[in-house]
Amino acid sequence: MRIVTVGDNCMDVYQSTGEAYPGGNPVNVAVYLSELGADTAYIGWVGTDRYGEIMVRAIQGKGVDTSRVCAKEGTTAITYVEMAGNERKLGDYEEGVMAGFCLSPEDLRFTESFQLVHSAIWGHADSYFPYFKEKGLLTSFDFADKLDHELVTTLSPYVDYPFLSYTQDDEHIRNLMKKIKAGGSRIVVATLGENGSLAYDGVRFYKHGIVEVEVIDTLGAGDSFIAGFIYGTLKGLPIERCLEQGAQRAAKTIGYFAAW
């Protein structure tokens, strides 16, 4: 199982303590998939600062191929995190060198050896998804909670497994999932926080609850769910089991501090 993730990385800086941890959706998904046993690689840019070195070493330490990570003159992206009890609140985001991110011809050729490519709405990689599909890659994309973003519908012909973040199972999210599926996606998935998750394959909706655990820090829960679902999908598991895999991986993540 070979998966490449593309796009944003950032250091999650906890303002209450000043501690900083590597993160960013594509990075997190690659790390979680590697922990599940997949062969993973990450493509992105880091700065020439201390955080850039920390980022690359940390990803490598988790068994992720970083051969296509490029250090650009400037600063690594930072997301400031505030804790409200066990819930994390994302504050200011400083994009740093990732603001100019693009894929080189060598990067694009590198992706062709993988089964699936994953990115997210802040990753500056959406324009490459037609290329990925042309080359026969499976694709997944995290739209997070940006449900009104134009990419949610315009990118659907090129995204096999789109992921959305919402709060509850209601008519609004179901209608949106139907619309995305009609655009060309294979299976549309929505994570619903404490209300579990929902998937739609064009025939029926599948619903799954959460795994009850003591919550330490919710950072990375959605990213780990995505990794669990993707892993199950590439293993050929039915949708119900893929949702279960996602819930189990998310439960593991929220049981410790920071994304990983």
Image: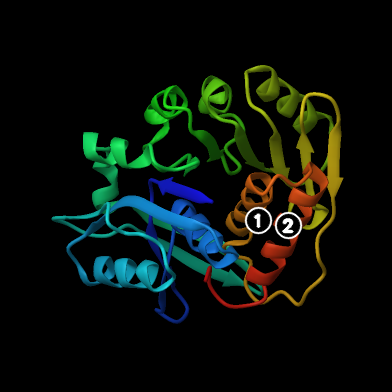
- Give the amino acid at mark 2: Gln
**On the picture, is 193 further left or further right than 77?**
right
Tag shown at residue 179: none
Q: Mark 1: few, some, or many residues within 10 Å (few <14, many ≥20)?
A: many
Question: Residue at label 1?
Answer: 228
Question: Residue at label 2?
Answer: 245
- Give the amino acid at mark 1: Gly
Q: Are marks 2 and 1 in contact (CB under 8 Å)?
A: yes
> Can you give x and y, in whole percent of width and height, for residue 190 in the image?
71, 41
Q: Mark 2: few, some, or many residues within 10 Å (few <14, many ≥20)?
A: many
Of 249 and 168, nearer the camera is 249
> Can you give x and y, in whole percent of width and height, for residue 54 in the image?
30, 72
Cα–Cα gap, marks 2 and 1? 5 Å
2 or 1: tag closer to the N-terminus: 1
Eyeballing the image, is 202 above or below 235?
Answer: above
Eyeballing the image, is 173 above or below 227?
Answer: above
